[in-house]
Amino acid sequence: MIKLSERQSLGGIAILAGREEELIELVRFAKATKVPLLLLKSSDFLQDLRSFVQSQRITRGYCLGFPEKITLESIRLFEDGIWNFHFGALPTYAGPDPLFWILKNGEKTVTLVCHRMDENWDAGCLLKQVVVPIFPGENYGMLGARLSQKTAEMIDSMLSDTTLSEKAIKLSPNPKPTRRPRLDDLLIDWENQSSDQIENLVNACNPSYGGARSTFGSAQIHILEVSPAMVRDTALFGPGSIVHATPEDGLFVLCSDYKYLKINILKTPECILSGSKLAALGLKKGTKLGKTTHLAKNSILIS
């Protein structure tokens, strides 16, 4: 947005009403730069968007992370269409949250795509794309921040390119776009997932999904950060077992491929703490971490 503002190419910012707190930095930017801010009603925003586009004489829309389907009628309000920035190769990673699946799948790179939208999800005409390496251990939040910076650089270069439309390539819609992750996708399966798969899942869940889910005893935990580890002289434990736990060293867990992960940061219902802190509070070697199960909802608590 700063790049567009510096070039005096930003005529307004539109967000869904109710997301002001989530997008507080964007709201503050609009106020500081005196860029008009439009709050769209989720149910039907076509008329409000039409009035705004006409009054501000806007000819092109830039879309980044808008959570709802943009209709063809809305796209046609803009003379030059709406350009969407998507964090994933198209059509392979079409869908509402490609970064989760890219990290969970252990991809080594992510493709930042800009395309002119049409009526299909994440389709239309490809305008520009760039392949960005994923750093080892990089989580969802860190990667998303880097891609946002790359998006600003991409916009800056595209504003100077007068041949984009001539080079545009028609994208094929993905008949089965990736879906938004469900609870089952966030669960660690110590018995069947390898250490790499668990680390990938943990990175994909931090911070947007509050960490990958697991249990010890009856306690629910969300694991936010792990790292590969070496452990010597461990007894014969099963996958998911804490094989070493001290306040000095932290917590080390055995995975199904008989490799180890150190639990660096986790969250309980009460607090966020380090593995070392949990060991200091009494979590012992031999404790078994498990997979969260769905319990029957046969009661109610009124508080």
Image (spheres, rainbow, N blue to C red):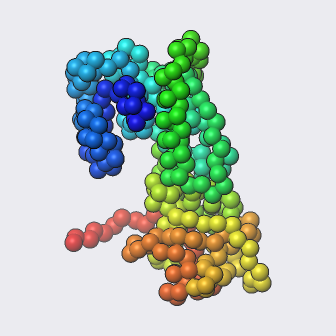
Q: Is residue 148 visible?
A: yes
Horizontal relation, residue 12 to residue 159: left or right: left
**Quadrant of the rendered image containing residue 70:** top left
Compare residues 181 and 48 and report the one nearer the observer: 48
Q: Position of residue 116 (x, y in %)?
A: 48, 22
- Is 217 or 113 nearer to us in this picture? 113
Instruction: From the viewer's perspective, tell me whether residue 117 is left or right of residue 289.
Output: left
User: Tag count in the figure?
Assistant: 0
> What is the x, y in percent for residue 37?
25, 35
Which picture quadrant has residue 73?
Answer: top left
Q: Is residue 13 above or below residue 302?
A: above
Q: Quadrant of the C terminus?
A: bottom left
The residue located at (71%, 79%) in the rendering is: 237
Give how far across and how far down residue 281 sits, in percent. 49, 86
Residue 89 in the image: above or below residue 251: above
Q: Image height check: is 219 above or below 280? A: above
| Quadrant (top left, top right, bottom left, bottom right) of the N terminus | top left
- Inspect this view and state whether residue 175 appears: no
Measured along the vertical axis of the image, is residue 199 above or below residue 66? below
